[in-house]
Structure formats: structure tokens, C-alpha cells
Image (cartoon, rainbow, N blue to C red):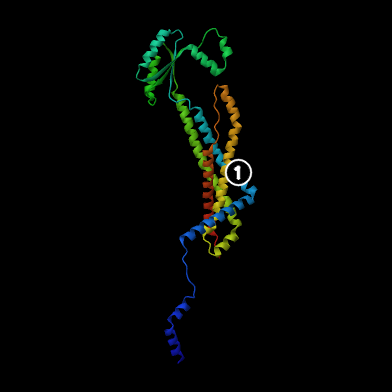
Amino acid sequence: MKQTQSRAQRQASPGADKRTRSTGAVAARTGFGDLWRSWLGHHREVALESLRRFFATPMASTMTALVIAIALALPAALQLGLANFQRAVAGWDGQPQVSVFLHKDARDAAVESFAAKLRSDPAIAEVTYISPEEALAEFEQASGLGDVLAGLDANPLPAVLLLRPRDTQDDDKLQILVANLQQQALTDSVVLDLAWVQRLTQLTEVGQRLSAGLAVLLALGVILVVVNTIRLHIESRREEILVVKLVGGTNAFVRRPFLYSGLCYGFCGGILAWLLLLGGVLLLSGPIAGLSSSYGSNYALAGPGFSYFIGLTAGAALLGLSGAWLAATRHIRAIEPT
């Protein structure tokens, strides 16, 4: 009788059963915006915490950043030196040049006729005549021996014709041109400056390759320094990592603070490397300016500009991040709660 009465009551009020069921737990779906804000908030908190830990141990952090800075400053200094060397020789076009020294007793009319003949030669692009007086004045200015040369009875320098060949890539044609010039009646001697051009080009190439090789080796050294530093940080926080993993923290979640630590080490190392370069340039700029002025030049040593600052800091930060990722990925994966 009671069961029949309860069924009748439920049939009479069907909404009552629905209201009873609706009072249970309700599952809510998290939106993409909430996930994005949570992800950004965690990154912000982790970055600030990494900075706080970095400055909490200033001596150890500075020493690590200084090691990174020295490793980065060495190839950067070599590259900066090559850039200054190329800028110093930028006024010289680097093309082979033939110097034809004429006999001292050659007459002016014969020299002019010989120069006109050479200008009409299709193998020669340009002919420049330097008289003995002009050669002596240029030598006095370059050597600073004006008082000594003034005491000479006669000008010891001959007239010179500077020839610029049209085809500078074919060594055989250059050698044929030199042989033809040596057979001329007014020619005393012929000098081809091709060897100096080749040596300068090879020296520059050697410097560039040396700089690139040194940069690769020292970049590996920076990564190893960061790997060892982050490994020590992980070992010192092993218990904390175990607790985070026990409550469900993923490897990516645990790894994130150490990535920011490696980024801090690399970025500060890049700043210190730029400061080391700047200090070296300031130390050498005075003597180099004095040396260049003694040769009648106003050449000044160029320092590391804003592009060097951006390159060093960004490259160092990337190396620090790479080293931290390698260390954290390997060692955090090995730490698992039992």
C-alpha cells in the first residue's frame, strides 16, 4: 500500500525527481582563454622566481655569467678585429696592379708616347704616370725622412707607370702582360702586385674561418657550462621536484623554471661579453689612433655597436636556453617518485 502511494506521488510531481537529480556535481569545460591566461601567468611567475634565485646568490651567478662572457668575447673580439682590418683597407680596392719603373735617362716625350701606347692597349684598363718629383714627395710624406732626402744631390727615384689590367682573374694573361712590358726599351723593371693581393685575401679567409671555428667550439663550451650549472640546481631541488610530481606535475611543468634560469645566465653573460669588448676597444683606441696619425691617417678603431649588443645577448640567451633544456630534460626525467 505504501509503495503504491509513493509511486503515485512521484507520478503526480515529475519535476521533483528532476530537481533532486540536478543537485549533484556538474562538470564544467575549461575554455581556451582560461588556459592561455593560466599558461602566461605561470610563465610570468616562473620568470620572476628565476630572477629572484639568480640574484639571491650574486657571487655564484656572476662567476657563471663571467665564464660565459669570456667564452663569447674571444670569437667576438676576433670577428671585430677582422671587421676593423677590412675597414682599414677599404680605401684600397684590392685589385692587382703592375708597376713599370722607367729608366732614369728616359726623356719626357718618349715617356708620354709610351704611356699613350699603353693606354691604347685593350689589355690595360688604366695608366697612371708618376713623375720622379711626385714619387719623391710621396715617399717623404709616407716615410717622414724629409730632412734626410733634402740633403741628397739628386732625386734617386725613377718615373713610374702604374697599370691596372683589365682582366685580373687570369694569371696567365697577367704574366704575358708583364713579359711584354719587360721587353720595352724604356722599361727598367716591372713589379706585379698580384702576390700581395692573394696573400691578403688568404689571410682574411683564414681569419674568418678561425673565428667561425673558435665560435663553434666556445659555443659548445657555453652549453656545457650551463648544463653543469642547471644540473646542480636540479639536484639541490630534488625533493621539491618529487613533491610536484606526486601531485601531478608534468616534466614540462617542472622543467620550466630551469629553462628561465639558463636564459638568465646566458643573457647576463652576453651583456658582460659586450662590456668586455667595449673595454678592450677603449683600451686600444688611443694607441691605434696615435699609430695611424703617424702615418698621416685619421683611422679610428670601431667599437661594438648596438648590433653587436643584440647579437651577443640574443646568442648567449639562446645558448643558455639550449644548455638548460638539455640538462633539465635529461635529469628531470630520471627523477620519479617511487
Q: Is residue 23 left or right of residue 121?
A: right
Is residue 184 visible in this depiction of the protein?
Answer: no
Quarter location, residue 192: top left
Please determine whether, in this image, residue 318 is positioned above or below residue 140: below
Query: Considering the numbered disc 1 on the image, is that residue within a helix, a strand or a loop?
Result: helix
Looking at the picture, how far across and down is residue 93, in whole percent? 45, 25
Q: Is residue 178 left or right of residue 325?
A: left
Looking at the picture, how far across and down is residue 106, in whole percent? 43, 8
> In percent of the image, x 48 and y 12: which residue is there?
132
Q: Quadrant of the C terminus?
A: bottom right
Looking at the picture, how far across and down is residue 52, in whole percent? 61, 52
Residue type beneath disc 1: Leu
Looking at the picture, how far across and down is residue 4, in whole percent? 43, 90
> In percent of the image, x 58 and y 45: which residue is there?
268
Please determine whether, in this image, residue 92 is positioned above or below residue 101: below
Q: Which residue is mark 1?
A: 66
> In percent of the image, x 40 and y 8: which residue is there?
110
Give the number of callouts.
1
Is residue 293 visible in this depiction of the protein?
Answer: yes
Q: Residue furthest bottom?
A: 1
Please tell me how crowded label 1 is: few (under 14), some (14-19), or many (20+) other residues with Cα within 10 Å. Answer: many
Please determine whether, in this image, residue 312 is positioned above or below residue 41: above
Q: Quadrant of the N terminus?
A: bottom left
